[in-house]
Image: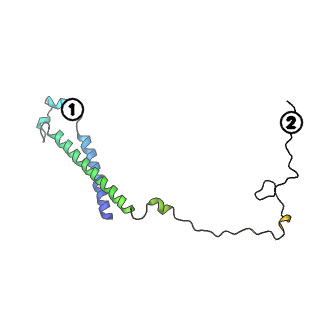
Amino acid sequence: MQILMTLTLVVQILSALVMIVLVLMQHGKGADMGASFGSGASGSLFGATGSANFLSRSTAVAATLFFVTTLMMAYFGNRANSGDGGLMEKLAAPAPVASVVSPAKPSGPISQVPSVPGAIGAAPQTASTPKPTASTSK
């Protein structure tokens, strides 16, 4: 499987390089007008319009090969990861559970434990809490 993936990657890189070279070799739209007035293109290997047709068809073949290899690489990459649950499940491995040591319990009765006002589990202090008074001033 790894050999096929490597071969696909090599073909994709080569087709990309060929496509780049073919696109750079093609003439622009303005160059076609000069070639039609006899700038010497008719004496070339492919004829007056043969080089444009050859380069455009070769570019289309290289682009098709590039897209096919891209789809193959996506398929092989997805197929390789489909059975193991994915990358995020590999990273989210459960952490080892550490033993938790509980704090020592007080040995005396609960009345000897000092209470902190506002602490969770503290007894309400009713005697020292001021009561709201109604104001008669307007």
Give the left or right position of residue 5, taking residue 132 as reference.
Answer: left
Q: Looking at the image, which is closer to me, 132 or 46?
A: 132
Q: Is residue 51 left or right of residue 8?
A: left
Image quarter (top left, top right, bottom left or bottom right) of the N terminus? bottom left
Is residue 75 positioned above or below 18 on the image? Answer: below
Which residue is more in the foreground, 9 or 109?
109
Q: Amino acid at mark 2?
A: Ser
Residue 137, relative to residue 72: is it above or below? above
- According to the picture, the residue beneath numbered tag 1 turns out to be 31
**Distance between the alpha carbons at the discs numbered 2 and 1:** 96 Å
Q: Position of residue 125 (x, y in %)?
A: 84, 54
Q: Is residue 22 left or right of residue 47?
A: right
In percent of width and height, residue 116 lies at 81, 57
Q: Position of residue 89 (x, y in %)?
A: 47, 61
Pick the front one: 22 or 113? 113
Q: Nearer the viewer, mark 2 or mark 1?
A: 2
Determine the image quadrant of residue 102.
bottom right
Of the residues under marks 2 and 1, which one precedes in the sequence?
A: 1
* Residue 111 location (% of width, % of height): 85, 64
Q: Amino acid at mark 1?
A: Ala
Q: Residues within 10 Å of mark 2 (few under 14, many from 20)?
A: few
Examine the image and state in which quarter residue 10 appears. Answer: bottom left
| Residue at 17%, 43% in the rendered image | 54
Q: Residue at x 24, y 44 (%)?
A: 22
Q: Residue at x 33, y 59 (%)?
A: 76
At 51% from the left edge and 64% from the top edge, which residue is drawn?
A: 93
Disc ID at residue 135 = 2
SS for tag 2? loop
Q: Secondary structure at mark 1?
A: helix
